[in-house]
Image (cartoon, rainbow, N blue to C red):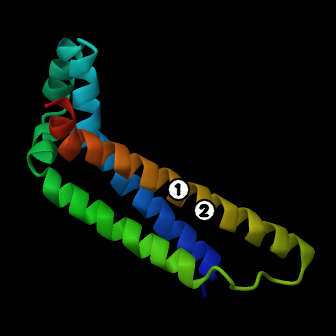
Amino acid sequence: MTTPQARDTALSTFALFTSLGTLLCCALPALLVGLGAGAVLAGMVSAWPQITFVSEHKAVVFWVAGVALTLAASARYASRNAPCPIEPGQAAACRRLRRFGDITLAASIMIYAVGAFFAFGIETFLS
């Protein structure tokens, strides 16, 4: 049986990967074009043409990432007072795993926010 900390960390890691998808679809292309590296973006699209599919369906990408973040944050909140084992080695591992999950979830939320800004907010910001 998995521990609550392991489950929560797995959810946080899944949320991190879905949040990285938001960067691929929106923030990275905007950054490359903004830096004058349109040729690099063109090279990326020719090497990996699926990136345009992801960009065209950015609402779905953000929806899935938002659901993953919500699930991960809910699981972390629900198990915030879950006890760690008494044995010192297992207790230390439990605390490390809990800290890693917290950092991963925080990084996921920040990445999601950056992706959302580049996908939906930059047009309003620049106009």
Q: Foreground residue, 114 or 25?
A: 114
Label 1 sits on residue: 106
Q: Residue at x 16, y 39 (%)?
A: 124
Quarter of the figure with residue 47: top left
Q: Residue at x 81, y 83 (%)?
A: 85
Judge from the rendering whether residue 51 lies leftward or rightward of residue 94; answer left or right.
left
Judge from the rendering whether residue 83 lies leftward or rightward of residue 69; answer left or right.
right
Say what secondary structure mark 2 lies in.
Answer: helix
State which quarter of the image contains the N terminus: bottom right
> Residue 78: x and y, percent?
55, 84
Are there few (<14), some (14-19), or many (20+) residues within 10 Å of tag 1? some
> Residue 118: x and y, percent?
25, 39
Q: Foreground residue, 28 or 123?
A: 123
Say what secondary structure mark 1 lies in.
Answer: helix
Q: Residue at x 55, y 73 (%)?
A: 8
Are there few (<14), some (14-19), or many (20+) residues within 10 Å of tag 2? some
> Residue 11: x and y, percent?
47, 69
CA–CA distance in space, label 1 to label 2: 6 Å
Q: Foreground residue, 126 or 101?
A: 126
> Residue 71: x and y, percent?
40, 75
Tell me, yes or no, whether the two marked residues, 1 and 2, touch with CB atoms within 8 Å.
yes
Judge from the rendering whether residue 103 lies leftward or rightward of residue 58; answer left or right.
right
Q: Residue 59 shows which numbered tag?
A: none
Q: Residue 102 shows which numbered tag?
A: 2
Residue type marked 2: Asp
